[in-house]
Image (cartoon, rainbow, N blue to C red):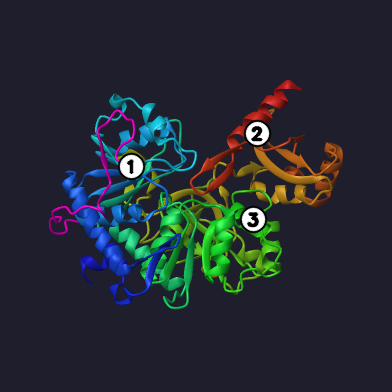
Amino acid sequence: MSANDFSLQSLIRIETAADPALVFGDTPVSRAEFSTKVEQTAAWLAAQGIGKGDVVAVWLVNRIEWLALLFAAARLGAVVAAVNTRYRGAEVAHLLKVSGARLMVVEAAFRSIDFAAILADIAKAEVPALQKLAVVGADAIPAHWPCVRFDAFDKSYPPAPPAQGDVDLPVLLYTTSGTTKGPKLVAHSQRTLATHAASVAHALRLDHQRHSLLAMLPFCGTFGMTSLLGFIAAGATIHVLDAFEAAPALNILGEHGITHSFGSDEMFRRILALTDAPRPFPNLEVCGFAAFQPGWRELAAEAETRGMLLFGLYGSSEVQALFSISRAGDAFADRIEGGGWPMSPNAKVRIRDIETGELAAQGVSGEIEISAPSRFLGYFNNPEATREAITADGFFRTGDIGRLRGDGSFVYETRAGDAMRLGGFLVGPGEIEDELKSCTGVADAQVVAVDLKGQARCVAFVIPAGEPPQQEALTARLRERLAGYKVPARIYVVDAFPVTDSANGVKIQRARLRAMAMERIAAE
């Protein structure tokens, strides 16, 4: 097998060129047309002085230019740094600085996002490598840097030099979870992206004539990009939302007979809320979802009754999204859990006991470690962090807690930082949260662990359903249902949980909940 078989270009199946590869709004783009746009974009990038090893930051919503830039960068041996459209000044500056991007391709405007105002908050000295901006949709925007228009599709440029891309060098940088030092950049090569895309297409048994995707997740994140590349590899048609909105998603799912979609629990919740039809999507086969919000089990049960089958997934920027998925033959309770079976037959998952450091047996919770063809190259320009994340035998330390089922599948339980060591046992907060939500008067619940008089104890926050419930009644109910060490030491009623936006949806700020718990306990 040649190196070209692992290139991004290898995913474009020209033999099905007459079929639309991508549909943006009402505009279809065939594979042949897309391949032409990639060549035009490669010529445009070369004219901007971009070549092998240069980094181009892409700060765009889901549009054909985004994909053309990625495939064109691969053709030239350049690197794309994906910028989340939710980012603001400090986050954009950090990414530009760490990546060393020479060029940023940016939207002129999109809805309420003022890209120029955000860039105005970034001093040139903060990002010394950045030389110019290229604007999509306008000639220029007010900025500290020179601006050119992204006109690759409108103007002829000299052909790009022969393909320079090395399939094992970085081609795409994702941002991972932030720390006090800012988020790290996760580097993937053409080989890791293309190989995993082929694995996804094969594992899902995608047929280019029968299957189609609603791409409603942002391309800047691994969740959106991986599902997109998997369907490109299958030669299937992809309907793209520039940014998620429930109403257009509902229309596309119904009008175009979409068979697959991937998103957060909240996205599917919003879509279902817009229709009263008992089975609104008869063609829909797989809805892969990530659970970011409380109440996801209840959502999955409701969706099931209406013909929207939700499948639990697992993934991360480091091993790519859709790393694993549950199967149609699984019992409902198992199918909706995060985890499942790896897409690649060459992937290996093991669990390490976080107390002993030894590999854990089947059914025992511990840190998930992964070796797979989809694994990242490392953290860009951060060899120390890379060394800390990879074991001596090449497994990625995920920082997630899970357990092996014993049949080749695994279960994702929680982030390691969210797992609680209570009474000498590792406990996932979801178990206690589910019991709280089953109590009268509780609409939602979140549980965190704190140090209380030298002991690890859990504290619960609940959103009331009507009249606020009494702690004594809730505690009594939980004592009937759970081991004593799992019963919260405190239960506080709140109007809402603190949240933060991510590329794929809204997430609960568990660190803030822990701080709130300690503040309230100290005030007693």
Q: Amino acid at mark 3?
A: Arg
Q: Which mark is residue 138?
A: 1
Q: Is residue 84 left or right of residue 495?
A: left
Outermost residue toward the top? 523
Q: Is residue 275 above or below residue 478?
A: below
In terms of image quadrants, where is residue 3? Answer: bottom left
Q: CA distance from mark 1 to mark 3?
A: 36 Å
Q: Is residue 148 magenta?
A: yes
Q: Which mark is residue 224?
A: none
Q: Is residue 99 above or below residue 246?
A: above
Residue identified by numbered label 3 = 269
The answer to whether one can see residue 362 in this image is no
- Select label 2 or label 3 by which is in front: 3
Counting residues from the start of the chain, the first of labels 2 and 1 encountered is: 1
Residue 130 lies, in percent from the top left, at 26, 34
Span of residues in magenta: 139-166
Q: Amino acid at mark 1?
A: Ala
Residue identified by numbered label 2 = 450
The residue sitting at 29% across, 77% down in the picture is: 15
The answer to whether one can see residue 408 in this image is yes
